[in-house]
Image (cartoon, rainbow, N blue to C red):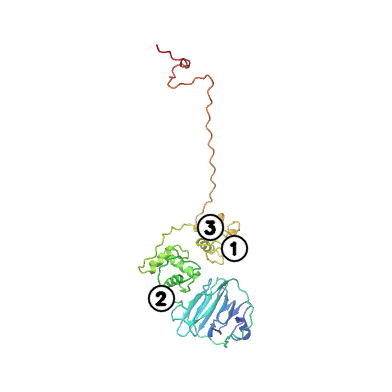
């Protein structure tokens, strides 16, 4: 049975400030949530949320851009939540408590996600957030409150001035991350899961300039895509955001300390122009990612700016706006005209429109020599042109 903070607002006037319809606003006071028989303190003087609902073992939050939520566990418990769009997570594990700060930055899309508190204590200085859960993207809106289930214990405390909370720190990789194998025998990309993804994240997290978030979730999400791009940029590889043959070889070289990488084919040199084929809704691949990244540079064309590698509804609308801007029929797919314009803008060199090759002109027939008139003499083989024709027609004298 889910319990909404709006019900809390009606039950208590001191712990909460005034709120607008469709929003939950927390004041400098604190609220204690009880899940899995453990207490979690929600604090922040600037925490404004679209909605938050709590059940006995997890809670679901809807956050718009520029919203923040802070959770503290005196039992030093971990959290489990997915990589979600533009959401960033800062976590620290101290000797007396664990603190988790969840932020949707300015310009981020509205998202809904589920957070599942763990039941085990975090290790001081180690990563304390793991992946999992479901993500629902979409706009905000008010969720109607429900009557709390009397069987679910929710502890409410009077307003208490929260103690100073230390600044959130990025989780550092554990000692295990220093000894993981850097050899990958298959490609990895957006949506991949499993042990290979965990090893990749542990390796990348060793370099904070490549993977500052340092989250080890086992899921290849948008944060991992950006970390791979940072790694590729640092070592002169095409920034496609997925682990292909070149990136696998470079990972083995950088982190392997002499370990021979798995044999990989030498890839062909990338073309100067990123788009070489027509694209429409349902298409996927690196060229779709390149298209989305290029369109996202113009906020009037692609304000969402999501580079997922999948040509969905948002990409259709972005292509239509691009076509409207450059006077092309707004069909929402990358056809011949749109492809030429994109190639021209992406390469910085005008791409000429090919002209049709004219058909070859027919070869005129050679004139046929008219036959000679009857009786007109012709020159015989071996006959001399100096002998009159009428003498040449006379038979040769018989030998005596």
Marks 1 and 2, the one that precedes in the sequence: 2
Marks 2 and 3, the one that precedes in the sequence: 2
* Image quadrant occupied by the C terminus: top left
- Where does label 3 land, which residue? 342
Q: Residue at horizontal 51%, vertical 82%?
A: 72
Coordinates of residue 34 in the picture (x, y in percent):
55, 84
Tell me the quarter of the picture where residue 181 sits.
Answer: bottom left
Of the residues tagged 2 and 3, which is closer to the observer?
2
Query: Crowdedness of circle 1 by 10 Å Cα count: few (<14), some, many (20+)?
Result: some
Coordinates of residue 74 in the picture (x, y in percent):
49, 85
- Where does label 1 land, which residue? 317
Q: Secondary structure at mark 1?
A: helix
Q: Secondary structure at mark 3?
A: helix
Which mark, residue 176? 2
Tell me the quarter of the picture where residue 138 sits.
Answer: bottom right
* Tags 1 and 3 touching, CB below 8 Å: no
Coordinates of residue 177 in the picture (x, y in percent):
41, 74
């Amino acid at each position: 049975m889910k319990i909404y903070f709006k019900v809390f607002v009606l039950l208590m006037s001191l712990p909460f400030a005034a709120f607008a319809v469709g929003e939950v606003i927390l004041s400098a006071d604190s609220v204690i949530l009880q899940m899995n028989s453990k207490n979690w303190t929600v604090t922040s003087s600037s925490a404004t949320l679209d909605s938050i609902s709590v059940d006995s073992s997890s809670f679901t939050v809807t956050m718009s851009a520029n919203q923040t939520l802070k959770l503290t566990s005196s039992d030093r418990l971990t959290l489990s939540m997915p990589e979600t769009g533009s959401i960033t997570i800062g976590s620290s594990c101290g000797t007396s408590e664990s603190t988790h700060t969840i932020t949707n930055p300015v310009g981020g899309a509205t998202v809904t996600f589920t957070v599942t508190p763990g039941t085990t204590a975090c290790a001081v200085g180690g990563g304390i957030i793991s992946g999992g859960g479901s993500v629902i993207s979409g706009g905000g809106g008010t969720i109607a409150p429900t009557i709390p289930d009397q069987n679910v214990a929710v502890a409410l405390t009077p307003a208490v001035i929260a103690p100073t909370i230390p600044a959130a720190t990025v989780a550092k990789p554990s000692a295990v991350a220093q000894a993981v194998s850097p050899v990958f025998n298959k490609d990895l990309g957006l949506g991949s899961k499993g042990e290979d993804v965990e090893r990749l994240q542990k390796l990348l997290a060793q370099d904070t300039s490549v993977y500052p978030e340092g989250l080890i979730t086992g899921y290849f999400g948008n944060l991992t895509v950006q970390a791979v791009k940072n790694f590729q940029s640092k070592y002169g590889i095409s920034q496609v955001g997925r682990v292909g043959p070149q990136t696998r070889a470079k990972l083995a070289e950088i982190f392997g300390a002499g370990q021979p990488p798995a044999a990989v084919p030498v890839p062909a040199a990338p073309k100067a122009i990123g788009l070489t084929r027509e694209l429409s809704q349902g298409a996927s691949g690196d060229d779709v990612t390149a298209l989305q990244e290029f369109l996202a540079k113009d906020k009037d064309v692609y304000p969402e700016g999501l580079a997922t590698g999948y040509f969905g509804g948002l990409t259709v609308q972005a292509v239509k706006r691009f076509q409207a801007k450059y006077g092309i029929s707004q069909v929402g797919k990358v056809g011949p005209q749109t492809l030429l314009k994109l190639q021209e803008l992406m390469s910085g060199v005008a791409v000429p429109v090919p002209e049709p090759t004219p058909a070859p002109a027919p070869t005129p027939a050679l004139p046929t020599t008219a036959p000679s008139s009857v009786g007109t003499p012709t020159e015989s083989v071996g006959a001399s042109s100096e002998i009159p024709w009428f003498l040449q027609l006379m038979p040769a004298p018989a030998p005596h």
